[in-house]
Image (spheres, rainbow, N blue to C red):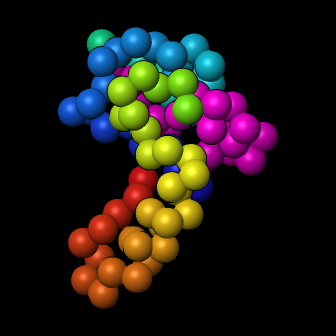
């Protein structure tokens, strides 16, 4: 599982980086997620951080499986989940 922060939605509130600094970090005024898979021991904190986002800049944790399925089913690779 990978984390993702939509830079168009992020307001730089630092909630995700404060809750799970092993996955989310601030770059300037916006949060970014690590580019690699979320370490298994960080998954619970990463989910809490996604839930704490006040603007929904992260994929909601309960929608991650559906987003991954959609990306995997796309025959031309137009959908990606990071």
Screen quadrant of the N terminus: bottom right
Along the line of sight, which residue is nearer the eye, 27 or 63?
63
Question: Which corner quadrant of the image does residue 42 belong to?
Answer: top right
Residue 52 position in % (x across, y down): 54, 24
Question: Which corner quadrant of the image does residue 26 belong to?
Answer: top left
Residue 68 position in % (x across, y down): 48, 66
Question: Which corner quadrant of the image does residue 9 belong to?
Answer: top left
Q: Does residue 42 appear to the left or right of 18 in the view shown? A: right
Q: Is residue 82 magenta?
A: no
State whether residue 18 is above or below residue 63: above
At x 53%, y 50%, the residue is 2
For the record, the magenta segment spans 30-50
Visible residue check, residue 70: yes
State whether residue 70 is above or below residue 76: above
At x 30%, y 87%, the residue is 75
At x 21%, y 33%, the residue is 8
> How many discs mark residues in the rendered view?
0
At x 41%, y 58%, the residue is 81
């Amino acid at each position: 599982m990978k984390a993702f922060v939509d830079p168009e939605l992020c307001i730089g509130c630092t909630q995700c980086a404060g809750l799970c600094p092993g996955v989310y970090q601030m770059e300037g005024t916006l949060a970014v997620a690590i580019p690699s898979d979320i370490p298994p021991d960080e998954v619970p904190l990463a989910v809490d951080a996604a839930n704490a986002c006040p603007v929904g800049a992260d994929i909601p944790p309960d929608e991650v499986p559906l987003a991954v399925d959609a990306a995997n089913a796309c025959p031309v690779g137009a959908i990606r989940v990071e």
